[in-house]
């Protein structure tokens, strides 16, 4: 995805990871506000995925469209799953799952930035 | 001291995340360019199945699921150590990366840490909690 969206998603994911990490270190179950923050980060993820879909529909051609689509499907699934774990596991371990989810979202943003790049003309692929 | 039961949920959640990553990777690789690196792509698919089994089994408490969790974590640890060593010793075997290449360095070594964490948790948490 574009650099602007990559930075937005990565910062949002790392913010969630940091806040959830502190709450987990305090040995607390995830408070409602943290689940709200997760939802806000998920909104950023969905907006970025939407921007990528619009880019694809309007002619952007990445090096591997299949790989990009795989990441576009996978990325929005991470936080809802992590939030479900945090809701079901009302201990610091459930909160830690949100930390992992935030880190994963940031990593996925970096990978999406890589796979978004168009194929090099010289590569012939 | 027994490990917290909830830690198993975190480990299972991380396995689920890696199941998603490996499944996506395997589907794309096998669908688009299987012939380029059949061994690497088959291994990715195998890893995806093992991650799925581990993620499911670690959240269950029956005797069968515990055995499955032990088996999945053990196979994964053996897999990541063997493939990690082979990928360094004989890179030509793996023209493209798997989740286990170079001990999972492409995934922050989580593929190496997860089975160890899973096995430690299983060993410490022998008593199935009342459901």
Image (cartoon, coloured by chain):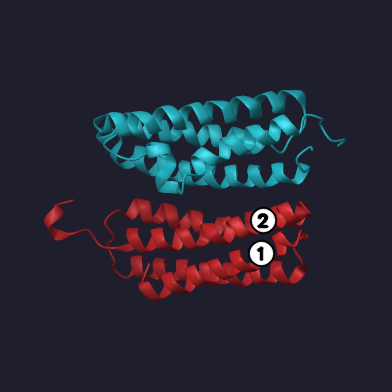
Give the percent coordinates (x, y) of residue B110: 51, 44
Q: Residue furthest left?
A: A122
Q: Nearer the viewer, residue A54 or B118?
A: B118
Q: Is residue A34 left or right of residue B116?
A: right
Name the chain under label 1: A
Quarter occupied by the C terminus of chain B: top right
Q: Nearer the viewer, residue B105 or B29?
A: B105
Q: Residue at x 36, y 34 (%)?
A: B41
Question: Is residue A44 placed above or below B45 in the rendered structure?
Answer: below
Q: Residue at x 32, y 34 (%)?
A: B88
Give the percent coordinates (x, y) of residue A23: 71, 64
Q: Nearer the viewer, residue A31 or A125?
A: A31
Q: Which numbered dot is residue A96?
A: 2
> How many badges with numbers are in the image?
2
In the image, the chain rendered in red is A
**Circles 2 and 1: CB distance less than 8 Å?**
yes
For mark 1, give the secondary structure. Answer: helix
Question: Is residue A42 placed above or below B107 in the rendered structure?
Answer: below
Residue ID for mark 1: A20
Q: Residue at x 33, y 62 (%)?
A: A116
Give the percent coordinates (x, y) of residue A123: 15, 53
Q: Residues within 10 Å of mark 2 (few under 14, many from 20)?
A: many
Q: Residue furthest front?
A: B1
Give the percent coordinates (x, y) of residue B4: 77, 43
Q: Is residue B18 visible?
A: yes
Mark 2 to mark 1 CA distance (whole Å): 7 Å
Q: Is residue B42 visible?
A: no
Question: Is residue A6 placed above or below A65 in the rendered structure?
Answer: below
Which colour represents chain B? cyan
Q: Which circle's residue, 2 or 1, is located before the other in the chain?
A: 1
Q: Residue at x 57, y 26 (%)?
A: B74
């Amino acid at each position: 995805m574009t650099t602007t969206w990559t930075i937005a998603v990565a910062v949002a994911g790392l913010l969630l990871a940091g806040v959830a990490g502190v709450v987990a270190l305090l040995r607390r179950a995830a408070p409602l506000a943290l689940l709200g923050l997760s939802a806000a980060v998920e909104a950023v993820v969905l907006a970025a995925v939407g921007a990528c879909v619009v880019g694809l529909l309007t002619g952007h051609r990445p090096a591997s469209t299949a790989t990009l689509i795989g990441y576009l499907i996978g990325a929005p699934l991470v936080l809802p799953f992590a939030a479900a774990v945090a809701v079901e596991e009302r201990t610091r371990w459930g909160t830690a799952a949100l930390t992992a989810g935030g880190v994963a979202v940031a990593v996925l943003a970096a990978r999406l930035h890589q796979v978004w790049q168009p194929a090099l003309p010289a590569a012939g692929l | 001291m027994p490990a917290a039961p909830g830690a198993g949920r975190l480990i299972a959640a991380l396995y689920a995340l890696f199941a998603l990553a490996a499944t996506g990777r395997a589907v794309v690789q096998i669908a688009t360019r299987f012939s380029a690196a059949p061994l690497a792509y088959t291994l990715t698919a195998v890893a995806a199945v093992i991650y799925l089994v581990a993620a499911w089994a670690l959240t269950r408490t029956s005797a069968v699921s515990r055995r499955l969790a032990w088996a999945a974590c053990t196979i994964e640890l053996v897999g990541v150590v063997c493939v990690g060593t082979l990928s360094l010793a004989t890179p030509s075997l793996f023209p493209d990366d798997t989740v286990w290449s170079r001990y999972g360095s492409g995934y922050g070594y989580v593929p190496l840490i997860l089975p160890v964490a899973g096995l430690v948790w299983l060993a410490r948490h022998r008593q199935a909690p009342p459901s």
